Image (cartoon, rainbow, N blue to C red):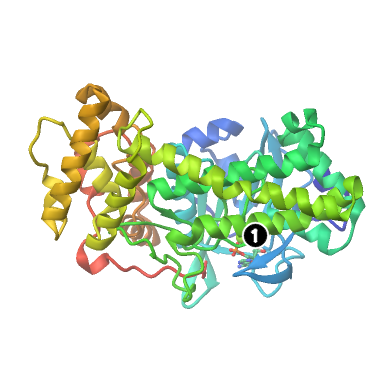
Protein backbone atom coordinates (compact mmCIF):
# COMPACT_ATOMS: atom_id res chain seq x y z
CA UNK A 1 0.00 0.00 0.00
CA UNK A 2 2.67 2.46 0.98
CA UNK A 3 4.04 2.59 -2.55
CA UNK A 4 0.66 3.13 -4.11
CA UNK A 5 0.17 6.31 -2.12
CA UNK A 6 3.31 7.72 -3.65
CA UNK A 7 1.71 10.06 -6.14
CA UNK A 8 -0.76 11.09 -8.80
CA UNK A 9 1.17 9.26 -11.51
CA UNK A 10 0.70 5.86 -9.84
CA UNK A 11 -2.85 6.01 -8.57
CA UNK A 12 -6.01 8.03 -8.24
CA UNK A 13 -7.51 8.65 -4.86
CA UNK A 14 -11.12 7.89 -5.63
CA UNK A 15 -14.21 6.89 -3.68
CA UNK A 16 -16.51 4.09 -4.76
CA UNK A 17 -19.77 5.21 -6.36
CA UNK A 18 -22.68 3.98 -4.25
CA UNK A 19 -25.13 1.39 -5.58
CA UNK A 20 -28.83 1.49 -4.79
CA UNK A 21 -30.36 -0.74 -2.09
CA UNK A 22 -27.58 -3.33 -1.77
CA UNK A 23 -28.19 -6.87 -0.47
CA UNK A 24 -26.01 -9.90 0.22
CA UNK A 25 -25.70 -12.40 -2.61
CA UNK A 26 -22.84 -14.44 -1.20
CA UNK A 27 -20.58 -14.35 1.83
CA UNK A 28 -17.51 -16.44 2.55
CA UNK A 29 -17.02 -16.71 6.27
CA UNK A 30 -13.49 -18.10 5.94
CA UNK A 31 -12.32 -15.20 3.74
CA UNK A 32 -14.23 -12.67 5.83
CA UNK A 33 -12.49 -13.85 9.00
CA UNK A 34 -9.15 -12.89 7.47
CA UNK A 35 -10.13 -9.23 7.59
CA UNK A 36 -12.62 -9.36 10.46
CA UNK A 37 -15.63 -8.70 8.22
CA UNK A 38 -19.15 -9.52 9.41
CA UNK A 39 -22.34 -10.20 7.53
CA UNK A 40 -24.14 -7.22 9.09
CA UNK A 41 -25.64 -3.92 7.89
CA UNK A 42 -22.50 -1.88 8.49
CA UNK A 43 -20.35 -4.17 6.42
CA UNK A 44 -23.03 -4.44 3.75
CA UNK A 45 -22.85 -0.69 3.28
CA UNK A 46 -19.09 -0.75 3.33
CA UNK A 47 -18.74 -3.58 0.81
CA UNK A 48 -21.34 -2.00 -1.46
CA UNK A 49 -19.11 1.07 -1.53
CA UNK A 50 -21.88 3.12 0.08
CA UNK A 51 -20.40 4.23 3.40
CA UNK A 52 -16.64 4.20 3.67
CA UNK A 53 -16.47 6.56 6.56
CA UNK A 54 -18.70 4.43 8.80
CA UNK A 55 -16.91 3.79 12.06
CA UNK A 56 -15.38 1.50 13.21
CA UNK A 57 -14.25 0.31 9.77
CA UNK A 58 -13.28 3.65 8.29
CA UNK A 59 -11.16 3.56 5.15
CA UNK A 60 -9.99 7.06 4.47
CA UNK A 61 -7.84 6.67 1.37
CA UNK A 62 -9.52 4.46 -1.23
CA UNK A 63 -7.67 4.40 -4.54
CA UNK A 64 -7.35 2.96 -8.00
CA UNK A 65 -3.96 1.95 -9.31
CA UNK A 66 -2.48 2.46 -12.77
CA UNK A 67 -0.79 -0.30 -14.76
CA UNK A 68 -0.27 -1.18 -18.42
CA UNK A 69 -0.06 -4.47 -20.22
CA UNK A 70 -0.09 -6.76 -23.21
CA UNK A 71 -3.53 -8.03 -24.16
CA UNK A 72 -3.75 -11.03 -26.49
CA UNK A 73 -0.07 -10.58 -27.26
CA UNK A 74 -0.35 -6.93 -28.25
CA UNK A 75 0.88 -3.92 -26.29
CA UNK A 76 -2.27 -2.21 -24.97
CA UNK A 77 -0.60 0.77 -23.30
CA UNK A 78 -2.04 2.22 -20.14
CA UNK A 79 -4.82 0.31 -18.39
CA UNK A 80 -5.43 0.38 -14.63
CA UNK A 81 -8.13 -0.33 -12.08
CA UNK A 82 -11.05 0.72 -14.24
CA UNK A 83 -13.65 -0.67 -11.88
CA UNK A 84 -11.76 -1.96 -8.86
CA UNK A 85 -11.21 0.33 -5.91
CA UNK A 86 -8.77 -0.50 -3.17
CA UNK A 87 -10.22 0.42 0.21
CA UNK A 88 -7.14 -0.14 2.32
CA UNK A 89 -5.67 -3.05 4.22
CA UNK A 90 -6.46 -5.16 7.25
CA UNK A 91 -4.33 -7.92 8.76
CA UNK A 92 -1.96 -7.97 5.78
CA UNK A 93 -4.73 -8.14 3.18
CA UNK A 94 -5.61 -5.44 0.70
CA UNK A 95 -9.37 -5.07 0.33
CA UNK A 96 -10.66 -4.29 -3.12
CA UNK A 97 -14.20 -3.64 -4.33
CA UNK A 98 -14.61 -4.83 -7.91
CA UNK A 99 -17.45 -3.11 -9.75
CA UNK A 100 -17.44 -0.08 -7.45
CA UNK A 101 -17.75 2.60 -10.12
CA UNK A 102 -15.68 4.67 -12.50
CA UNK A 103 -12.10 5.70 -11.94
CA UNK A 104 -9.63 7.69 -14.02
CA UNK A 105 -8.69 4.39 -15.68
CA UNK A 106 -12.18 3.32 -16.74
CA UNK A 107 -11.65 4.35 -20.38
CA UNK A 108 -14.98 3.56 -22.13
CA UNK A 109 -16.22 1.32 -19.30
CA UNK A 110 -18.92 2.09 -16.77
CA UNK A 111 -16.90 0.96 -13.76
CA UNK A 112 -19.44 -1.71 -12.94
CA UNK A 113 -19.52 -5.50 -12.83
CA UNK A 114 -22.64 -7.58 -13.43
CA UNK A 115 -24.13 -10.09 -11.01
CA UNK A 116 -23.26 -13.08 -13.21
CA UNK A 117 -19.52 -12.38 -13.41
CA UNK A 118 -19.32 -11.36 -9.74
CA UNK A 119 -20.83 -14.68 -8.63
CA UNK A 120 -18.41 -16.55 -10.88
CA UNK A 121 -15.40 -14.69 -9.48
CA UNK A 122 -16.63 -15.15 -5.90
CA UNK A 123 -17.20 -18.89 -6.21
CA UNK A 124 -14.09 -19.62 -8.21
CA UNK A 125 -11.75 -17.65 -5.93
CA UNK A 126 -12.96 -19.62 -2.94
CA UNK A 127 -12.95 -22.91 -4.86
CA UNK A 128 -9.37 -22.39 -6.00
CA UNK A 129 -8.27 -21.59 -2.48
CA UNK A 130 -9.87 -24.80 -1.22
CA UNK A 131 -8.04 -26.69 -3.99
CA UNK A 132 -4.79 -25.38 -2.55
CA UNK A 133 -4.09 -23.07 -5.48
CA UNK A 134 -2.71 -19.59 -4.75
CA UNK A 135 -5.39 -17.04 -5.56
CA UNK A 136 -6.92 -13.75 -4.61
CA UNK A 137 -9.79 -14.52 -2.21
CA UNK A 138 -13.38 -13.31 -2.30
CA UNK A 139 -15.19 -12.16 0.81
CA UNK A 140 -18.61 -11.34 -0.57
CA UNK A 141 -20.84 -10.41 -3.44
CA UNK A 142 -23.26 -7.59 -2.87
CA UNK A 143 -26.08 -7.17 -5.39
CA UNK A 144 -28.40 -4.35 -6.39
CA UNK A 145 -31.25 -3.80 -8.81
CA UNK A 146 -29.27 -0.99 -10.40
CA UNK A 147 -29.29 -1.63 -14.16
CA UNK A 148 -26.06 -2.25 -16.09
CA UNK A 149 -25.96 -2.51 -19.86
CA UNK A 150 -24.01 -5.32 -21.46
CA UNK A 151 -25.27 -7.37 -24.46
CA UNK A 152 -28.57 -7.23 -22.58
CA UNK A 153 -29.71 -5.27 -19.58
CA UNK A 154 -28.32 -6.80 -16.38
CA UNK A 155 -27.89 -5.68 -12.78
CA UNK A 156 -24.87 -4.41 -10.86
CA UNK A 157 -22.94 -6.26 -8.19
CA UNK A 158 -19.76 -5.65 -6.23
CA UNK A 159 -17.35 -8.45 -5.43
CA UNK A 160 -15.02 -7.86 -2.49
CA UNK A 161 -11.62 -9.36 -3.21
CA UNK A 162 -8.73 -9.61 -0.81
CA UNK A 163 -5.07 -10.47 -1.38
CA UNK A 164 -1.70 -9.60 0.13
CA UNK A 165 -1.31 -7.54 -3.04
CA UNK A 166 -3.04 -7.03 -6.38
CA UNK A 167 0.17 -5.94 -8.12
CA UNK A 168 0.61 -7.24 -11.66
CA UNK A 169 3.27 -7.76 -14.30
CA UNK A 170 1.59 -4.77 -15.95
CA UNK A 171 2.83 -2.52 -13.13
CA UNK A 172 6.44 -3.14 -14.12
CA UNK A 173 5.56 -2.76 -17.77
CA UNK A 174 3.90 0.56 -17.02
CA UNK A 175 6.90 2.21 -15.38
CA UNK A 176 9.30 0.73 -17.90
CA UNK A 177 7.20 2.09 -20.78
CA UNK A 178 7.22 5.53 -19.19
CA UNK A 179 11.02 5.28 -18.91
CA UNK A 180 10.72 6.19 -15.27
CA UNK A 181 13.68 4.49 -13.53
CA UNK A 182 12.93 6.24 -10.25
CA UNK A 183 9.45 4.76 -10.01
CA UNK A 184 10.72 1.38 -11.21
CA UNK A 185 13.27 1.37 -8.42
CA UNK A 186 10.76 2.41 -5.79
CA UNK A 187 8.34 -0.17 -7.05
CA UNK A 188 10.78 -3.05 -7.00
CA UNK A 189 12.10 -2.01 -3.57
CA UNK A 190 8.55 -2.01 -2.27
CA UNK A 191 7.83 -5.43 -3.75
CA UNK A 192 11.07 -6.83 -2.34
CA UNK A 193 10.52 -5.49 1.15
CA UNK A 194 6.83 -6.30 1.42
CA UNK A 195 6.53 -9.56 -0.46
CA UNK A 196 9.92 -11.05 -1.29
CA UNK A 197 12.18 -10.19 1.69
CA UNK A 198 14.11 -13.45 1.18
CA UNK A 199 15.49 -12.03 -2.10
CA UNK A 200 17.11 -9.16 -0.21
CA UNK A 201 19.78 -11.59 1.01
CA UNK A 202 20.80 -12.37 -2.56
CA UNK A 203 23.89 -10.75 -4.09
CA UNK A 204 21.55 -9.29 -6.70
CA UNK A 205 18.11 -8.83 -5.11
CA UNK A 206 16.43 -7.53 -8.26
CA UNK A 207 17.50 -10.47 -10.38
CA UNK A 208 16.51 -12.76 -7.51
CA UNK A 209 13.12 -11.04 -7.49
CA UNK A 210 12.60 -11.83 -11.17
CA UNK A 211 13.58 -15.45 -10.55
CA UNK A 212 11.26 -15.76 -7.57
CA UNK A 213 8.25 -14.31 -9.41
CA UNK A 214 8.93 -16.52 -12.41
CA UNK A 215 9.27 -19.61 -10.25
CA UNK A 216 6.01 -18.94 -8.41
CA UNK A 217 4.29 -18.36 -11.73
CA UNK A 218 5.60 -21.63 -13.17
CA UNK A 219 4.32 -23.47 -10.12
CA UNK A 220 0.96 -21.71 -10.40
CA UNK A 221 0.40 -22.78 -14.03
CA UNK A 222 1.35 -26.35 -13.18
CA UNK A 223 -1.30 -26.28 -10.43
CA UNK A 224 -3.88 -25.01 -12.94
CA UNK A 225 -3.01 -27.76 -15.40
CA UNK A 226 -3.30 -30.35 -12.63
CA UNK A 227 -6.93 -29.46 -11.90
CA UNK A 228 -7.90 -28.64 -15.49
CA UNK A 229 -8.36 -24.92 -14.85
CA UNK A 230 -8.35 -22.55 -17.83
CA UNK A 231 -8.01 -18.89 -16.94
CA UNK A 232 -9.30 -17.55 -20.24
CA UNK A 233 -7.61 -14.12 -20.36
CA UNK A 234 -3.95 -14.51 -19.51
CA UNK A 235 -2.94 -11.00 -20.45
CA UNK A 236 0.11 -9.60 -18.69
CA UNK A 237 -2.11 -7.18 -16.77
CA UNK A 238 -3.98 -10.17 -15.35
CA UNK A 239 -0.75 -11.85 -14.23
CA UNK A 240 -0.01 -11.44 -10.53
CA UNK A 241 3.44 -10.52 -9.25
CA UNK A 242 2.80 -12.81 -6.26
CA UNK A 243 2.00 -15.91 -8.30
CA UNK A 244 -1.73 -15.71 -7.51
CA UNK A 245 -4.61 -16.62 -9.78
CA UNK A 246 -6.32 -13.29 -10.39
CA UNK A 247 -8.94 -11.47 -12.46
CA UNK A 248 -11.44 -14.22 -12.95
CA UNK A 249 -13.40 -13.65 -16.13
CA UNK A 250 -14.35 -16.23 -18.76
CA UNK A 251 -12.49 -19.03 -16.93
CA UNK A 252 -13.56 -22.66 -17.07
CA UNK A 253 -12.64 -26.06 -15.72
CA UNK A 254 -12.25 -28.87 -18.21
CA UNK A 255 -15.15 -31.28 -18.32
CA UNK A 256 -14.36 -33.76 -21.10
CA UNK A 257 -10.59 -33.49 -21.53
CA UNK A 258 -9.43 -31.58 -24.56
CA UNK A 259 -5.91 -30.26 -24.55
CA UNK A 260 -6.86 -27.45 -26.93
CA UNK A 261 -9.98 -26.47 -25.01
CA UNK A 262 -10.77 -22.73 -25.25
CA UNK A 263 -12.95 -21.46 -22.42
CA UNK A 264 -13.20 -17.84 -23.56
CA UNK A 265 -15.65 -17.43 -26.41
CA UNK A 266 -13.87 -14.19 -27.44
CA UNK A 267 -10.51 -16.00 -27.84
CA UNK A 268 -11.20 -17.35 -31.32
CA UNK A 269 -7.52 -18.06 -32.03
CA UNK A 270 -7.11 -20.16 -28.90
CA UNK A 271 -4.19 -18.12 -27.56
CA UNK A 272 -5.30 -18.98 -24.05
CA UNK A 273 -6.38 -22.58 -24.64
CA UNK A 274 -5.73 -25.04 -21.78
CA UNK A 275 -2.64 -26.57 -23.37
CA UNK A 276 -1.12 -23.19 -24.15
CA UNK A 277 -1.24 -21.73 -20.64
CA UNK A 278 2.33 -22.74 -19.74
CA UNK A 279 3.81 -21.10 -22.87
CA UNK A 280 1.65 -18.04 -22.44
CA UNK A 281 2.73 -17.52 -18.84
CA UNK A 282 6.33 -18.00 -19.95
CA UNK A 283 5.70 -15.28 -22.49
CA UNK A 284 4.21 -13.10 -19.74
CA UNK A 285 7.42 -13.61 -17.81
CA UNK A 286 9.28 -12.23 -20.84
CA UNK A 287 7.04 -9.14 -20.49
CA UNK A 288 8.13 -8.98 -16.86
CA UNK A 289 11.75 -9.32 -17.94
CA UNK A 290 11.21 -6.40 -20.34
CA UNK A 291 9.72 -4.38 -17.48
CA UNK A 292 12.61 -5.15 -15.15
CA UNK A 293 15.38 -4.75 -17.72
CA UNK A 294 15.96 -1.02 -17.10
CA UNK A 295 16.45 -1.81 -13.40
CA UNK A 296 19.12 -4.39 -14.03
CA UNK A 297 20.78 -2.25 -16.67
CA UNK A 298 21.42 0.34 -13.98
CA UNK A 299 23.21 -2.28 -11.93
CA UNK A 300 25.18 -4.35 -14.43
CA UNK A 301 25.05 -2.65 -17.82
CA UNK A 302 22.81 -3.42 -20.78
CA UNK A 303 24.48 -6.55 -22.20
CA UNK A 304 24.91 -8.30 -18.89
CA UNK A 305 21.35 -7.41 -17.81
CA UNK A 306 19.92 -8.89 -21.01
CA UNK A 307 22.04 -12.00 -20.65
CA UNK A 308 21.09 -12.56 -16.99
CA UNK A 309 17.38 -12.06 -17.57
CA UNK A 310 17.46 -14.34 -20.60
CA UNK A 311 19.15 -17.04 -18.54
CA UNK A 312 16.61 -16.62 -15.75
CA UNK A 313 13.75 -16.74 -18.26
CA UNK A 314 15.01 -20.02 -19.61
CA UNK A 315 14.51 -21.57 -16.18
CA UNK A 316 10.73 -21.15 -16.48
CA UNK A 317 10.00 -24.24 -18.61
CA UNK A 318 12.25 -26.32 -16.37
CA UNK A 319 10.56 -25.10 -13.19
CA UNK A 320 7.18 -25.70 -14.81
CA UNK A 321 8.11 -29.24 -15.88
CA UNK A 322 9.39 -30.07 -12.39
CA UNK A 323 6.14 -28.90 -10.79
CA UNK A 324 3.96 -30.52 -13.42
CA UNK A 325 5.71 -33.86 -13.09
CA UNK A 326 5.57 -33.83 -9.34
CA UNK A 327 1.86 -32.90 -9.32
CA UNK A 328 0.84 -35.53 -11.86
CA UNK A 329 2.93 -38.12 -10.06
CA UNK A 330 0.94 -37.48 -6.91
CA UNK A 331 -2.27 -37.48 -8.90
CA UNK A 332 -1.43 -41.05 -9.88
CA UNK A 333 -0.20 -41.95 -6.41
CA UNK A 334 3.41 -42.50 -7.50
CA UNK A 335 5.59 -41.58 -4.59
CA UNK A 336 8.89 -42.87 -5.94
CA UNK A 337 10.59 -41.46 -8.99
CA UNK A 338 10.81 -44.19 -11.59
CA UNK A 339 11.80 -44.39 -15.23
CA UNK A 340 8.79 -44.53 -17.51
CA UNK A 341 6.52 -42.58 -15.15
CA UNK A 342 6.28 -39.56 -17.40
CA UNK A 343 5.35 -41.80 -20.33
CA UNK A 344 2.67 -43.37 -18.17
CA UNK A 345 1.21 -39.96 -17.30
CA UNK A 346 1.41 -38.71 -20.86
CA UNK A 347 -0.17 -41.84 -22.24
CA UNK A 348 -3.14 -41.40 -19.88
CA UNK A 349 -3.52 -37.77 -20.92
CA UNK A 350 -3.42 -38.77 -24.57
CA UNK A 351 -6.12 -41.40 -24.00
CA UNK A 352 -8.24 -38.92 -22.04
CA UNK A 353 -7.93 -36.44 -24.89
CA UNK A 354 -8.77 -38.96 -27.61
CA UNK A 355 -11.76 -40.21 -25.68
CA UNK A 356 -12.76 -36.84 -24.18
CA UNK A 357 -12.96 -38.38 -20.75
CA UNK A 358 -13.96 -36.14 -17.86
CA UNK A 359 -10.68 -34.82 -16.42
CA UNK A 360 -11.74 -34.51 -12.79
CA UNK A 361 -13.73 -37.73 -12.60
CA UNK A 362 -11.01 -39.76 -14.30
CA UNK A 363 -8.40 -38.90 -11.67
CA UNK A 364 -10.94 -39.24 -8.87
CA UNK A 365 -11.90 -42.71 -10.11
CA UNK A 366 -8.23 -43.73 -10.22
CA UNK A 367 -7.97 -42.55 -6.61
CA UNK A 368 -10.28 -45.44 -5.69
CA UNK A 369 -8.40 -48.05 -7.71
CA UNK A 370 -7.14 -51.12 -5.90
CA UNK A 371 -4.39 -53.15 -7.57
CA UNK A 372 -6.30 -56.36 -6.76
CA UNK A 373 -9.17 -55.20 -8.93
CA UNK A 374 -9.24 -56.61 -12.45
CA UNK A 375 -11.15 -53.67 -13.86
CA UNK A 376 -12.74 -50.36 -12.91
CA UNK A 377 -15.94 -48.63 -13.99
CA UNK A 378 -13.93 -45.77 -15.48
CA UNK A 379 -13.16 -48.13 -18.37
CA UNK A 380 -16.63 -47.49 -19.80
CA UNK A 381 -15.78 -43.82 -20.31
CA UNK A 382 -13.17 -44.78 -22.91
CA UNK A 383 -14.41 -45.61 -26.38
CA UNK A 384 -11.23 -47.54 -27.00
CA UNK A 385 -11.44 -49.93 -24.06
CA UNK A 386 -8.61 -52.16 -25.21
CA UNK A 387 -6.23 -49.22 -25.10
CA UNK A 388 -7.43 -48.26 -21.64
CA UNK A 389 -7.02 -51.88 -20.47
CA UNK A 390 -3.41 -51.84 -21.63
CA UNK A 391 -2.79 -48.58 -19.82
CA UNK A 392 -4.40 -49.86 -16.62
CA UNK A 393 -2.26 -53.02 -16.73
CA UNK A 394 0.90 -50.92 -16.93
CA UNK A 395 -0.38 -48.68 -14.15
CA UNK A 396 -1.21 -51.67 -11.93
CA UNK A 397 2.28 -53.13 -12.49
CA UNK A 398 3.82 -49.78 -11.67
CA UNK A 399 1.86 -49.52 -8.40
CA UNK A 400 2.71 -53.10 -7.43
CA UNK A 401 6.37 -52.36 -8.13
CA UNK A 402 6.17 -49.47 -5.66
CA UNK A 403 4.81 -51.86 -2.99
CA UNK A 404 2.60 -49.11 -1.60
CA UNK A 405 -0.40 -50.01 0.50
CA UNK A 406 -3.57 -49.60 -1.58
CA UNK A 407 -5.63 -47.95 1.15
CA UNK A 408 -2.90 -45.49 2.08
CA UNK A 409 -2.28 -44.54 -1.53
CA UNK A 410 -5.98 -44.03 -2.14
CA UNK A 411 -6.19 -41.61 0.79
CA UNK A 412 -3.25 -39.60 -0.54
CA UNK A 413 -4.65 -39.56 -4.07
CA UNK A 414 -8.06 -38.40 -2.88
CA UNK A 415 -6.34 -35.44 -1.24
CA UNK A 416 -4.97 -34.21 -4.55
CA UNK A 417 -7.67 -35.30 -6.99
CA UNK A 418 -10.77 -33.23 -6.21
CA UNK A 419 -14.26 -34.60 -6.54
CA UNK A 420 -15.84 -31.15 -6.89
CA UNK A 421 -14.83 -28.30 -9.16
CA UNK A 422 -16.75 -25.22 -10.29
CA UNK A 423 -18.19 -26.53 -13.52
CA UNK A 424 -19.79 -23.89 -15.74
CA UNK A 425 -23.20 -25.50 -15.68
CA UNK A 426 -23.21 -25.48 -11.86
CA UNK A 427 -22.26 -21.81 -11.75
CA UNK A 428 -24.97 -21.13 -14.32
CA UNK A 429 -27.71 -22.63 -12.15
CA UNK A 430 -26.55 -20.56 -9.17
CA UNK A 431 -26.50 -17.40 -11.32
CA UNK A 432 -29.95 -17.94 -12.78
CA UNK A 433 -31.43 -18.47 -9.33
CA UNK A 434 -29.63 -15.41 -7.95
CA UNK A 435 -31.01 -13.34 -10.82
CA UNK A 436 -34.46 -14.03 -9.38
CA UNK A 437 -33.30 -13.34 -5.82
CA UNK A 438 -32.77 -16.92 -4.71
CA UNK A 439 -29.24 -17.06 -3.31
CA UNK A 440 -29.47 -20.54 -1.84
CA UNK A 441 -27.56 -22.15 -4.70
CA UNK A 442 -24.66 -19.69 -4.37
CA UNK A 443 -24.45 -20.67 -0.72
CA UNK A 444 -24.75 -24.40 -1.42
CA UNK A 445 -22.08 -24.32 -4.15
CA UNK A 446 -19.73 -22.36 -1.91
CA UNK A 447 -20.27 -24.92 0.84
CA UNK A 448 -19.50 -27.85 -1.51
CA UNK A 449 -16.53 -26.20 -3.21
CA UNK A 450 -14.92 -25.31 0.09
CA UNK A 451 -14.44 -29.07 0.65
CA UNK A 452 -13.54 -30.31 -2.84
CA UNK A 453 -11.66 -33.41 -1.69
CA UNK A 454 -14.36 -34.73 0.68
CA UNK A 455 -16.79 -37.36 -0.57
CA UNK A 456 -19.88 -35.33 0.41
CA UNK A 457 -22.10 -38.13 -0.81
CA UNK A 458 -25.26 -36.10 -0.37
CA UNK A 459 -23.98 -33.77 -3.12
CA UNK A 460 -22.92 -36.52 -5.53
CA UNK A 461 -24.83 -34.95 -8.43
CA UNK A 462 -22.53 -31.89 -8.24
CA UNK A 463 -19.62 -34.09 -9.28
CA UNK A 464 -21.29 -35.23 -12.49
CA UNK A 465 -20.21 -33.92 -15.90
CA UNK A 466 -22.63 -31.48 -17.51
CA UNK A 467 -25.75 -32.88 -19.14
CA UNK A 468 -25.40 -32.82 -22.93
CA UNK A 469 -27.52 -29.68 -23.40
CA UNK A 470 -25.29 -27.73 -20.98
CA UNK A 471 -21.92 -28.91 -22.27
CA UNK A 472 -21.02 -25.83 -24.23
CA UNK A 473 -22.07 -22.80 -22.23
CA UNK A 474 -20.35 -19.86 -23.89
CA UNK A 475 -18.54 -17.46 -21.63
CA UNK A 476 -17.13 -14.26 -23.08
CA UNK A 477 -15.07 -11.33 -21.81
CA UNK A 478 -18.27 -9.38 -21.21
CA UNK A 479 -18.58 -8.90 -17.49
P1 LIG B 1 -10.04 -7.47 -17.66
O1 LIG B 1 -9.68 -8.12 -18.93
O2 LIG B 1 -11.45 -7.76 -17.18
O3 LIG B 1 -9.06 -7.77 -16.59
O4 LIG B 1 -10.08 -5.88 -17.90
C1 LIG B 1 -9.10 -5.19 -18.64
C2 LIG B 1 -9.12 -3.73 -18.30
O5 LIG B 1 -10.40 -3.15 -18.57
C3 LIG B 1 -8.83 -3.42 -16.84
O6 LIG B 1 -8.05 -2.27 -16.80
C4 LIG B 1 -10.20 -3.19 -16.25
O7 LIG B 1 -10.16 -2.36 -15.12
C5 LIG B 1 -10.94 -2.55 -17.40
N1 LIG B 1 -12.38 -2.79 -17.38
C6 LIG B 1 -13.02 -3.94 -17.63
N2 LIG B 1 -14.35 -3.80 -17.51
C7 LIG B 1 -14.57 -2.50 -17.15
C8 LIG B 1 -15.72 -1.71 -16.87
N3 LIG B 1 -16.96 -2.22 -16.94
N4 LIG B 1 -15.55 -0.41 -16.55
C9 LIG B 1 -14.33 0.12 -16.48
N5 LIG B 1 -13.19 -0.56 -16.74
C10 LIG B 1 -13.30 -1.86 -17.07
MG1 LIG C 1 -7.79 -7.44 -15.49
Q: Which residue is disc 1 drawn over? A: 236
Where is 226 relative to 265, above or below?
A: above
Where is 434 relative to 478, above or below?
A: above
Residue closest to the eye, 352 or 182: 352
Where does residue 175 sit, x and y in percent of width and height?
Answer: 83, 58
| Residue drawn at x 29%, y 51% as measured from the top left | 347
| Residue drawn at x 47%, y 70% as measured from the top left | 270
| SS under mark 1 | helix
| Residue 323 seen in the current view | yes
Residue at the farthest front position: 339
| Residue 25 seen in the current view | no
| Residue drawn at x 48%, y 75% as measured from the top left | 269
| Residue drawn at x 47%, y 63% as measured from the top left | 250
Residue closest to the eye, 467 or 447: 467
Residue closest to the eye, 136 or 429: 136
Where does residue 364 sit, x and y in percent of width and height?
Answer: 25, 41
Q: Quadrant of ligand 2?
A: bottom right
Q: Is residue 79 left or right of residue 317?
A: right
Amino acid sequence: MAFLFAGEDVCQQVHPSPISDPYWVGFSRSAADLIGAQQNTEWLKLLAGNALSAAPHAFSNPLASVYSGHQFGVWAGQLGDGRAILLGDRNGYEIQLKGAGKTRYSRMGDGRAVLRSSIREFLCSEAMHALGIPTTRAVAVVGSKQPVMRETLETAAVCTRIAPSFLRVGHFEHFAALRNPERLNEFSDYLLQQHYPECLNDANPKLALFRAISERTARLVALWQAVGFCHGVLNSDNTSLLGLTMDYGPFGFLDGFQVDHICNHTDSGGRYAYGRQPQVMHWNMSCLAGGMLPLLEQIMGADEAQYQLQQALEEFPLAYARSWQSLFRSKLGLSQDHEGDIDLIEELIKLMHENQVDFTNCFRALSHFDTNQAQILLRDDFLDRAQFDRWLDTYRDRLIFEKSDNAQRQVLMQRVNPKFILRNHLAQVAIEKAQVDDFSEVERLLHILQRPFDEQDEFRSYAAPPPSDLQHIEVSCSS
